[in-house]
Image (spheres, grey):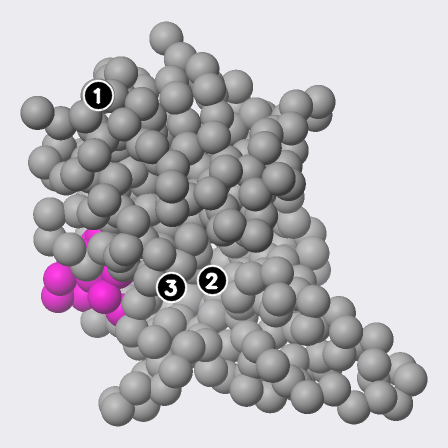
Amino acid sequence: MSYRLAVVGATGNVGRVLLDILSERDFPVEKLHALGSERSVGKSVSFGEKETVPLEFLDTFDFSQIDLVFFCASDALAQKHIPHIQGTSKAYIIDKSSAFRMDPHVPLMVPEINAGTLSWAAKKRLIANPNCVVVPLALSLQTLAQGNSLKKVVVSTYQSVSGAGKEAMDELYLQTKATYVAEALTPEVFSKPIAFNVIPQIDRIEHDGFTGEEHKIMSELKKIIHPSLQVTPTCVRVPVFNGHAASVHATFEKPLPLSAARERFSAEKSIQLYDSASKELYATPLDIAGEDAVYISRLRQDPKTPTELTFWLTCDNLRKGAALNAVQIAELLVRHKLLEKSLKPD
């Protein structure tokens, strides 16, 4: 059986990668609609190696004959359009924005670890895709926490500019180029120059000193793993075009030997463990660009603290951090036969 799909935000970083992944994984598509702003109408996006899809205007699109919507646009657009879609269609919606992630009736899903929450989606037909750094964090931490409660996580993230959109990637490119010709460029996307720099702020700084991005990590990990989990994040934007990384320090209720941690990481198909005595065997964002796995390296433990583990994590934020995770959710919907030929609700 094949399905009628709509991709909202098809021209953005995540939308384009999502179209690639749908083609790569042979998702059963009957008809694909690529949706964008009014100014994008008349243009087209690539789907697979040979096919192109014309862009249609989101505001006037009829969702009543759609089975599945991938929403890859801003929080504001999600808040505006998703209730309308829910009211005019029986389509399931997989939302990449943060607009509904903390709604208690909306599952926040990483299919490898909490596919059971799919049942929550029956009423609203809405599933939230976690933040692009939360996906690999949740997957790696929950993989370790089997039979051993996770108590605390201290994480520093090193997030590429692609997570902030195409304009951010352009800003890094232009600032890098300008530096070599002694040309000064005023930052527009970021608060400070991003080329040859690191910025310890992603999203605005809140009253408690944490940024919006740090609050997302705290709240989303608690929703996915456990409400009592202690999470202390520091989010840093780095001058890398694509790929997120993180230094993770996890504390468990009971001792977790390194050997057991290695076994658990190795057993998870979505994780690639780099584990060797070699000091140079580790994954960087450049190494894993275009890859689907979450890469774990520099796994280590202080013998004096057997309940604690430290590791380095890298992930392609546009793939497993965003688009791939969304497609895996869609595959779960297909597997459970939850997508139906959609008609306007009674």
Element at label 1: loop
Element at label 3: strand
Residue topped by disc 3: 309
Which mark is first along the chain, 2 or 1? 2
Residue 1: which numbered mark, if any?
Answer: none
Residue 20 in the image: state x and y as whole percent.
59, 34
36 relative to 125 in the view: left or right: right
Confirm or deny contact between disc 3 and disc 1 (CB under 8 A): no
Say which quarter of the image contains residue 102: bottom left
Q: Is residue 186 magenta?
A: no
Residue topped by disc 1: 343
- Please state which amino acid type lies under the numbered disc 3: Leu
The quadrant of the rendering that contains the C terminus is top left
| Residue that appears at 50% across and 84% down | 200
Say which quarter of the image contains residue 290: top right
Query: The magenta stretch spans which residues?
Result: 218-229
Q: Is residue 293 visible?
A: no
- Please state which amino acid type lies under the numbered disc 1: Leu
The quadrant of the rendering that contains the N terminus is top left
Residue topped by disc 2: 311
Q: Is residue 218 visible?
A: yes
- Please state which amino acid type lies under the numbered disc 2: Phe
Residue 246 in the image: state x and y as whole percent.
49, 66
294 relative to 145 in the view: left or right: right
